Amino acid sequence: MNVFVTRLIPTTGLKLMVDAGIVVNQWKEPYDVPADELIQICKEHDALISVGQDKIDKNFLTACSHLKVIAQMAVGFDNIDLIEASKLRIPIGNTPGVLSRATADVSFMLMLMVSRMATFMYRKILDGKWGFYDPTANLGVELYGKTLGIYGLGKIGLEMAQKCSNAFGMNIIYHNRNPSLLADRSLGAKFVSFESLLGRSDVLSVHSALTEETKNKFTLECFSKMKPTAIFINTARGSIHNERDLTEALRSKMIWGAGLDVTNPEPMQASNPLLMMPNVVILPHIGSATIETRGEMSRLAAENIIAASRGIKIPYLVNPSAYS
């Protein structure tokens, strides 16, 4: 089997595939593979590892219906047409579990940075404005005993909840499709309605998958129902919040601050007004960006490819109907 990889990836996964006798070709340019070129390249390969947000739509899948497997080197797979892939019997794999801690770390970091206006204060030093001490200026907020609201309490959301509970004694509320017995028992977390989540959260952290239900979920109407002292955090997908509405909510002081590791679109333009707001911190989608996590992600992607090369069911499957 030969596999095409749409980015340079850590050697952990590469070595596994090479040792399994798989021929690996990687895209080495510092830009996304153009859609038409990706189709032409994949026509000459048996499998694909998609890294990032390659558009794996019906057009691509129809043109590359011969592929034995597509391994997404990410947890999310909203860039892939799963229905069409299943029709064509192409198994799709992802990399679940291994980036939960790293992503939750970034959520926690954003919460702290926003609460103390860290980026804004750092820019003051760069601008030569670290001067007269005013004890009433540029004050942050404390997090002790506050209420953390989680939208989408999966593995990442649970990690974030545990950190906030342990570090600051925060009360945990959450909104899911279904209650989480683990969160209820281990953290005393409370399952609440979406309206209650908006109204009660001092920090509202988003950890849901991007679906038709969650796309554009957080609009101006939602922000208007939050506390004027609330902090909004999103490390899931940028399309879950309406960025124009978030900007207006911050400008009009509907909410106190925001921390984002994901934006819409990505990358964010340097002229975006959110970047200049004192109570906002933006990161360039670095949730899984640790040596350990990216190595594990490449391992899981490689294991999906190796399984397909041996004619067995891939271990991290997201579309079981592909084998029906």
Image (cartoon, grey):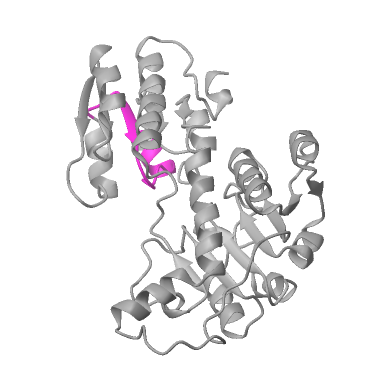
Q: What residue is at 62 percent from the left and 71 percent from the top?
A: 141
In the image: residue 253, left or right of residue 69: right
Q: What residue is at 77 percent from the left and 58 percent from the top?
A: 194
Q: What residue is at 57 percent from the left and 24 percent from the top?
A: 320
Residue 218 in the image: state x and y as whole percent: 64, 65
Numbered label tally? 0
Q: Quadrant of residue 168?
A: bottom right
The image shows residue 139, relative to residue 266, as above or below, that is: below
The image shows residue 218, relative to residue 275, as above or below, that is: above
Q: Quadrant of residue 216?
A: bottom right
Which stretch did the figure color magenta? 44-61
Residue 211 in the image: state x and y as whole percent: 60, 49
User: Which one is nearer the viewer's eye here, 25 or 9?
Assistant: 9
The image shows residue 38, relative to residue 230, as above or below, that is: above
The answer to if 85 sits in the magenta stretch is no
The answer to if 59 sits in the magenta stretch is yes
User: Which one is nearer the viewer's eye here, 310 or 108?
Assistant: 108
Residue 205 in the image: state x and y as whole percent: 62, 56
User: Which one is nearer the viewer's eye here, 247 or 100?
Assistant: 100
Q: Most extreme residue toward the left, as rendered? A: 29
Q: What residue is at 38 percent from the left and 67 percent from the top?
A: 268
